[in-house]
Amino acid sequence: MTDNVLAFEEFTGLKLAGLDDCDIAILNLCAARGLPDTETLEVDVLLDKLDEWARQVKVEIWRHLYRFEIQASQPPTEFSYGNSLGRFFCWYMLQVLQEDCGVAYHPDRKFNPDCCRPEDLFIHGIVDENGKGGTCASMPVVYVAVARRLGLPVYLVETRGHLFFRWDAPHGTTIHWDSPPLDLWIPPDRFNVEGSGEGIAYYADSHYIQWPELWTQSDFEHERYLRSMSAKEVFAAFLIQRAECFHALGKRDECMKAIYFARQLIPNDRRYEWLHAKRTKELRDYEVSMDHLLQMEQKRRATRKALPGVRGHSPNCQCLHCEQSRDLSQFLPVAPHGPSCQCWHCREAREATEAPLGMPGHPLSCQCAGCLNKRTQPHPIHVAATHQIMRRITTTHATGPANVAQPNPDRLPGI
């Protein structure tokens, strides 16, 4: 970031002064730009699809409006709209989106979104024709995008580990539609709408203090949860999702850029300050470890050049027999060395048999929890590779390869 600090407009393609009037769907897709599998996204097509969904919702609400009894005395509950006209609108909007438009959870990652797959966190996983569904990070964004196309006063709300949306109209709101024709005033109301599962619910704020994750003391102190989010706060949250995707994919520079611009939008957010400090430390530790690995690789190459080849060949000969001899010399845990020896050469031999496996479909540099856990588990490939190398070593020291000089332990430095 210090060498080439981009302006906000260069990084996002948006103007900071116009965020309040910007479509929340555009903010979300802009934050996803540059992530894997987003290169071919046609933003205009996705926005047109949201417009079509909004038209479908209008028609269905208009058709079923006769069902609402404005004089009814039945109060709303967690799972019914009762005599609340705002809840009635949200009820039918979610019903149409879920049943007719296919807005739903991804069946395989309903409660476990994968940061290596941006479609789990951004709305193109739902709106795109090849999308398989979303998560609680993307479904509420689709609901808010459609609701605002209908003129409904809804806002995205964040709690610990979850997003939902809220109807927030303390002075009431007027709905004006040209097609189908509708002019309607909705009384003041404020309620939360939960549609990120199967069905619709209206939970109170207290519900989200304990679900889906119990708040800690710091969650109460930073005072960022359970607030109707402004456009800047929403876009900052999308940028943090972008940062976590790049972090899981091992692209630390892009991760730091996204966090930097999120902090520019909301400079006094303690959560982003803490995350920025954490990722900065991880980046510095990574750079130190890479320097150490580079030095070890240079030392290994220098040592390898000093290893013997076939008798009579030049020291720099690159023929198959010389290369085989040098390769065998790297795996030389012979007496007085053994399986528990911790010298540099024995550690090199053991590390060479460990295949860098991770989750299927993830890149080799992926640092997500699944890949890290996968690499720490024993794998049949590791065992087979170890047996194969040890058989080669045993055979070589017992009979010696044809036309290959026997490795001399005395010539290896440090032994």
Image (tube, rainbow, N blue to C red):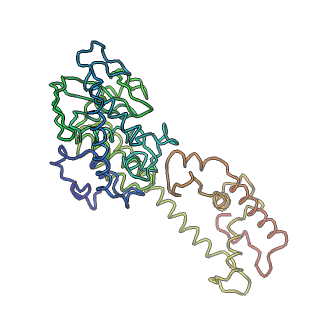
- The picture places residue 97, in percent across and down from the top left corner, at 36, 39
| Residue occupying the point 66% across, 75% down | 307
Residue lying at the far right of the rendered structure: 399
Residue 280 visible in image = no
Compare residues 69 and 84 and report the one nearer the observer. 69
- Which residue is more in the foreground, 200 or 61? 61
> Which quarter of the picture shows residue 61?
top left
Left or right: 289, with 392 as reference point:
left
- Return the x and y of residue 413 as percentages of the image width and height: 64, 67
Count of numbered marks: 0
Task: Kindly tell me whether residue 98 is visible in this rendering.
Answer: yes
Q: As displayed, is residue 180 above or below residue 203?
A: below
Residue 383 shown left or right of residue 82 in the figure: right
With respect to residue 32, does 211 lie above or below?
Answer: above
Q: Give how far across and how far down residue 79 sits, in percent.
A: 38, 22
> Which of the 4 image quadrants contains residue 303?
bottom right
Q: Is residue 107 above or below residue 217?
A: below
Q: Position of residue 99 (x, y in %)?
A: 41, 37
Quarter of the image where the N terminus is located:
bottom left
Q: Nearer the viewer, residue 329 or 127?
A: 127
Position of 350 compared to 218: left or right? right
Residue at coordinates 64% horizontally, 61% vertically from top-left? Answer: 352
- In this view, the residue in front, 23 or 81, is 81
Image quadrant where one finds the C terminus: bottom right
